[in-house]
Amino acid sequence: MPGSNPFRNDPVLRALNDNKVLWGDLMLDLEEGVAPVARATRKSSSKRRSSSRKMRAVTPRSYRSEIMEGFRTPDLRLRKAIYENFPVNVREVAGGAFEIVWNDAKLDAWRRQRALSWDEFQEYEAYCEFRLIHSMRKHSDRYELLPTTNSHQIVRFRMIAEEAVFRGPKLMRLNDIKTHFPIVWHKVDGRAGETTYAIELRGDFMRKTAKAEVAATTAALLEALRASRAWSVMNATANNGGAVCRIEMNHE
């Protein structure tokens, strides 16, 4: 039926049809079910996306290895983590489904700030799309991926299990965290232009409290931090001492 084929604008599939790329070079990664080639040259109405970008005919494993080098799959158990970890917007559409579309301003900013190589800078949209789909498939217990219905969508999905309503404390400021949890925070180096803090449990609490209670407090703290829209939660680094995590303040 006209308009029902989600791959109609895919240049890779068009190249396959025209015998410009061999099927043997584009076998699916059967182990993880990941499509081997991101749509690096997909057309868009946005003037930002360069029409001079060229499709790269590479083997799936070499392309996948290049894109995934240094990438760590983020925790996407919460739906908001999708747009915290990728330059996209998530919007609910008809039938209980959600669509993922590019956030153009964030995509341009992250391209300049986060690209680690010239190839990634040139094809940042393709890198992000590949990593996003990979990460969502790693959370197959949370998301059912659906075909796109228009050219602006990266992918659609349906929640397999709705997110449980968080019943804990509402944390919107640093002082809110301190009110509800025995913590201290330290400003640490983060991405250029972003305010980042390391969050750690107080030393006196750690010394006087049983290990089981410390573990329970840590779990509750992380759950409450992740439920907040005021920041994005990231893993602590070796330079952050005994921090439980880092938080990067959101601009919204």
Image: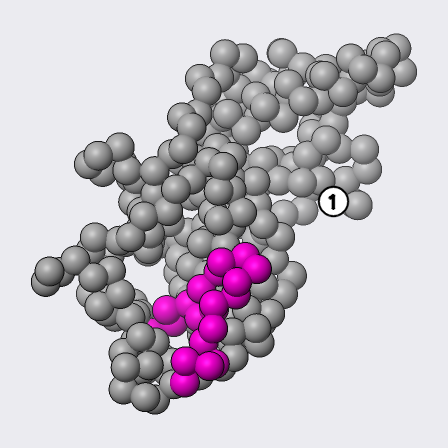
- Give percent across and percent down for residue 247: 60, 35
Q: Which residue was labeled with disc 1?
A: 237
- Give percent across and percent down for residue 197: 65, 35
- Give percent across and percent down for residue 251: 44, 38
* Identity, as a three-letter code, of the amino acid under mark 1: Thr
Overall secondary structure of the magenta section: loop
- The residue drawn where x is 50% and y is 54% is 134
Q: Of 22 and 95, which appears nearest the observer?
A: 22
* Label 1: element kind: loop
- The residue drawn where x is 60% and y is 70% is 65
Stretch in magenta = 22-41
Q: Is residue 39 rendered to the left or right of residue 237?
A: left
Q: Of 152 and 111, which appears nearest the observer?
A: 152
Q: Quadrant of the N terminus?
A: bottom left
Residue 231 located within the stretch drawn in magenta: no
Residue 30 located within the stretch drawn in magenta: yes
Q: Residue furthest bottom?
A: 20
